[in-house]
Image (spheres, coloured by chain):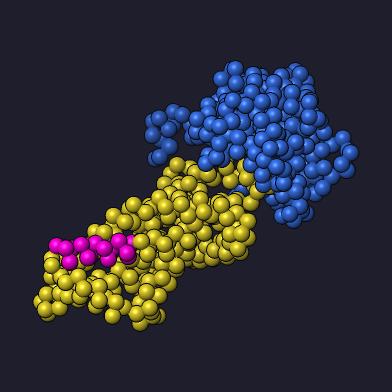
Chain colours: A blue, B yellow
Amino acid sequence: MDETSENLIEIHDLKYSRGPRPIFEGMNLTIKRGEITALMGPSGTGKTTLLRLITRQLIPQQGVIYVNGVDISKLNVRELYEMRQRFGMLFQNGALLTDISVFENVAFPLREHTKLTNRLIRHVVLTKLHAVGLRGAADMMPSELSGGMARRVALARAMVMDPDIVIYDEPFVGLDPISMGVIVRLVRKMNDALGITSIIVSHDVAEVSTVADRSFLISDGKVAASGSPDELRTAKSELVRQFMHGMADGPVAFHFQAPGYEEQLLGRDTE
Amino acid sequence: MKKPLLDIYNALFEFVRTFGAFQIFFLRLLKNSPEILFTRFRLVVAQVFNAGGLSLVIIMVCGLFVGGVLGLQGFSNLARFNAEDSVGVFAAYGLIKELGPVITALLFAGRAGTSLASEIGLMKATDQLSAMEMMAVNPVGRVLVPRFLGGVISMPLLTAVFSAIGLLGAHLVAVNLLGVDVGAFWQQMQNALDFEDVNEGIIKSVVFGVVASHIAVWEGYNAIPTAEGVGRATTRTVVNTAIAVLVFDFMITAAMI
């Protein structure tokens, strides 16, 4: 795989555990260049952990992750930081720096990594803020923004270095329908207009289905199913059906492991 | 191995491991400090203002009253030996060598140390530090070192202010209130105090600045990223700084006598 390969990210035989609990057991996954890929799965399946592994915030115990043809476990700190400059990441809560303004938040990567003049930085930042509809909020502080606005500012910040890959960690959580619609459209528009590759981690089947080109359903440390949203929706697998249609019980049990209900109510489990 | 013994072994192992990590973290701060001081001087100045400038009022108020107490105690006790004119010397020794650095460090832990620890802890809890990592910016250099240096630079300055205001407090009480001769107050102080005495206070304030800032930054950076975790980190900052300052105070005093 090289920089012109169709696959931007390849994960081979990934194993990662947290303490005694295995998170991934031999996972294989490929993310194609220029597509919007969704990583879905029940809570606790390690979707965010997978993002952290792809960006090498965590290191796998076994397996290889290639990004743009490079085994990221072999990068030194300088090379890792160079690679991360080609990533944009939208955190679940925005993760804006609270002690600087919206403008400075978006300008932050430019000030850190480029020698652009203040005039040029102003131009770029205002362009990005305009794209997310928040040029008028440039002088506000993050504490003055609503959740949806904060996420849009974070999106502008993730885009400001014109990255190759943008990663969205639960971008739709806690948003009202209007903000959610805005974010969904922005994800699609930015992906197509800038030719980037997007990875979305989300539970939100309905919203993800409208925007993703390809979805992976992760369960029990492996990829349980993959395909276009339509393919997943019509899949026969019980797990996929339970997840895609939001059924309370199925292969993923509604009840956490516990002693028998009657036994516990009658206090027999402690005898 | 029996369970109590195993618990003691595990606790000891954990203590040694944490202490080692604490020292390595200190070396990381030191290693990054010269570069940050030259390349991000404005960030350091901002943190000197945050840690030092915003602590000034509390330091001045406390300094005034501690000086006043020294004036009162000095006068009433020295009067037994007809030596009340030496109250200036008494206050100066107490403030410059001991109370100035120690009380300033304790107040710093309560005002600036807690603020540093909770700020860094909350930055961690809200993914701001991870976001920096993802933007290829090292949070140690961008967030931790400027705050550490801000504290280290602030402490000697705050100590100087505390001692100066304390002497003013002692003067107000002893001279203006109790009628000690103003000439005797200052002249005896000038004759008795050596540069070495002042030096001791300066050394203590620098060491306390390093200790207090290191603990605050460490606790914040290693806080469990929850509301409870940040709260605990803040509490530990005050308690550990107080203990460390008093231990170091004893060691430096013993070394310089």
Magenta: main secondary structure: helix
Q: Position of residue A93 (x, y in %)?
A: 57, 34
Which residue is at the front of the view, A67 or A219?
A67
Is residue A267 or residue A187 the one in the foreground? A187
Q: Front-most of B65 and B247?
A: B65
Per the rendered image, the range of residues in magenta is B162-177
Seen at 87% across and 41% down, the residue is A3
Image quarter of the C terminus of chain B: bottom left
Which residue occupies 46% across, 52% down? B49
Using residue A25 as the reference point, say whether residue A263 is left or right of it. left
Q: Position of residue B2 (x, y in %)?
A: 45, 64
Res B165 quadrant in image: bottom left
Q: Is residue B221 visible?
A: yes
Left or right, A123 with reference to B142: right
Magenta-span inclusion, residue B83? no
- In the image as oriented, which residue stretches furthest toward the bottom? B257
Q: Residue at x 44, y 59 (%)?
A: B154
Residue B96 falls in image quadrant? bottom left
**Could you say which quadrant of the image residue B207 lies in?**
bottom left
Left or right, A4 with respect to B228, comes to right
Whether residue A76 is situated above or below residue A267 in the rendered picture? below
